[in-house]
């Protein structure tokens, strides 16, 4: 029996996957995934600037704990989040409960994004998904996006982009290599997101490309050990739900390599990250299918948990 077959034989059922992968992490999810404290507000501002006006209706896929959703809801006439994990949904409700001014214009649907979206046809201005593109079934997403969108609607993916010398980026690459050696294919969110946008932009004559732009950049220090410890505490690795023994085997191998690469797992390393957005827009009738460039967003510098530096107002 191959390693892949052995892992597959030990897999839990597919039902409840989202809850197993994310529900148990919900209470510490934001801290572990680590957006800069000011990032949600600046992400929402950038999305409004991209649209050219405050959105009437926003749909967020994979709304998570509502970290970005609160900032989006504050700028929209109506906001709906879609989240499959009950644990994450509970954190979403707690966050929104502290913003009672949003209660009349925001809602959360606890469901998988691969089910029918909670929106009427031709009703949504902005469909947004942050760090979740690798979970969507492409055919369903394209069909639902075409259904709910109207001329001018933007579908935008957001993600954290890490510097080349970032330890998490190096560790992630080594984890992916170790999984492929074992016959397993990791879920690659950035690559899948790019493929998804390409498929939409080149498959629908109504769409225009929105090139990737950075919204915010922040710096901090991190040690390989804390990143690896965070991965050990999760039930998944590179988007794959693995048995504990298989997960530990891969992480032990990568830990040895990291110890050699960085001169110790506790070594604190300077890092930089930025949050970037890219997407497609359903252009008005008769518009040219050219990239939507506009003025680039000024990159704002921040420490991970500190104030913005060199702010340019949007």
Image (spheres, rainbow, N blue to C red):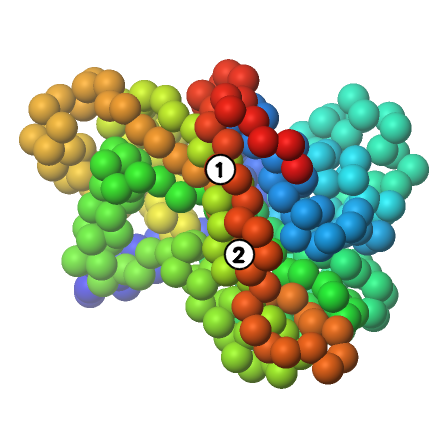
Q: Is residue 159 left or right of residue 266?
A: right
Look at the numbered disc 2 and give the secondary structure of its residue.
strand
- Circle on res. 156: none
Viewer-nearest residue: 12 or 103:
103
Viewer-nearest residue: 48 or 145:
48
Disc 2 to disc 1: CB gap under 8 Å: no
Residue 104 position within the rendered picture, expressed as x and y whole percent measured from the top left: 92, 37
Q: Which residue is mark 1?
A: 299
At x 18%, y 39%, the residue is 254
Location of residue 64 by image quarter: top right
Report how many numbered discs are placed on residues in the image. Answer: 2
Location of residue 137 by image quarter: bottom right
- Circle on res. 278: 2
Q: Is residue 303 left or right of residue 61?
A: left
Viewer-nearest residue: 296 or 215:
296
144 versus 104 height, above or below: below
Q: Is residue 105 left or right of residue 11?
A: right
Look at the numbered disc 1 and give the secondary structure of its residue.
loop
Q: Is residue 113 left or right of residue 24?
A: right
160 versus 56 height, above or below: above
Residue 177 position within the rendered picture, expressed as x and y whole percent measured from the top left: 20, 53
Residue 274 position within the rendered picture, expressed as x and y whole percent measured from the top left: 44, 38
Residue 69 shows up from this direction: no
Location of residue 19 by image quarter: top right
At x 68%, y 47%, the residue is 49
Question: Which mark's residue is nearer the viewer, 2 or 1?
Answer: 1
**Image quarter hosting the N terminus:** bottom left
Question: Rounded to the nearest whole Å, what is the CA distance between mark 2 and mark 1?
Answer: 15 Å
Q: Badge 2 local density, few (<14 within 10 Å), some, or many (20+)?
A: some
At x 73%, y 82%, the residue is 286
């Amino acid at each position: 029996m191959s390693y892949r077959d052995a892992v597959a034989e030990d897999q839990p059922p597919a039902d409840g996957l989202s809850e197993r992968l994310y529900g148990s992490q919900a209470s510490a999810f934001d801290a572990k995934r680590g957006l800069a404290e000011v990032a949600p507000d600046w992400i929402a501002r950038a999305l409004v600037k991209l649209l050219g006006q405050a959105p009437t209706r926003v749909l967020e896929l994979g709304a998570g704990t509502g970290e970005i959703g609160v900032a989006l809801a504050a700028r929209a006439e109506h906001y709906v989040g879609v989240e499959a994990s009950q644990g994450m949904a509970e954190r979403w409700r707690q966050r929104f409960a502290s913003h009672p001014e949003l209660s009349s214009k925001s809602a959360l649907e606890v469901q998988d994004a691969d089910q029918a979206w909670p929106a009427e046809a031709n009703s949504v201005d902005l469909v947004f998904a942050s760090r979740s593109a690798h979970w969507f079934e492409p055919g369903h997403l394209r069909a639902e996006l075409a259904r709910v969108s109207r001329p001018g609607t933007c579908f935008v993916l957001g993600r954290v982009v890490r510097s080349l010398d970032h330890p998490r980026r190096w560790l992630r690459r080594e984890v992916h290599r170790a999984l492929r050696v074992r016959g397993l294919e990791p879920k690659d969110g950035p690559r899948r997101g790019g493929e998804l946008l390409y498929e939409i932009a080149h498959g629908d004559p109504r769409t225009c490309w929105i090139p990737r732009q950075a919204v915010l950049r922040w710096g901090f220090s991190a040690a390989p050990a804390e990143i690896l410890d965070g991965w050990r505490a999760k039930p998944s690795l590179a988007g794959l739900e693995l048995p504990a023994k298989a997960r530990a085997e891969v992480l032990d191998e990568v830990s040895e390599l990291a110890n050699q690469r960085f001169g110790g797992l506790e070594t604190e390393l300077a890092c930089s990250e930025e949050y970037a957005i890219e997407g497609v827009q359903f252009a008005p009738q008769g518009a040219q299918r050219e990239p939507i460039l506009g003025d680039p967003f000024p990159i704002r510098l921040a420490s991970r948990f500190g104030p913005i530096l060199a702010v340019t107002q949007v």
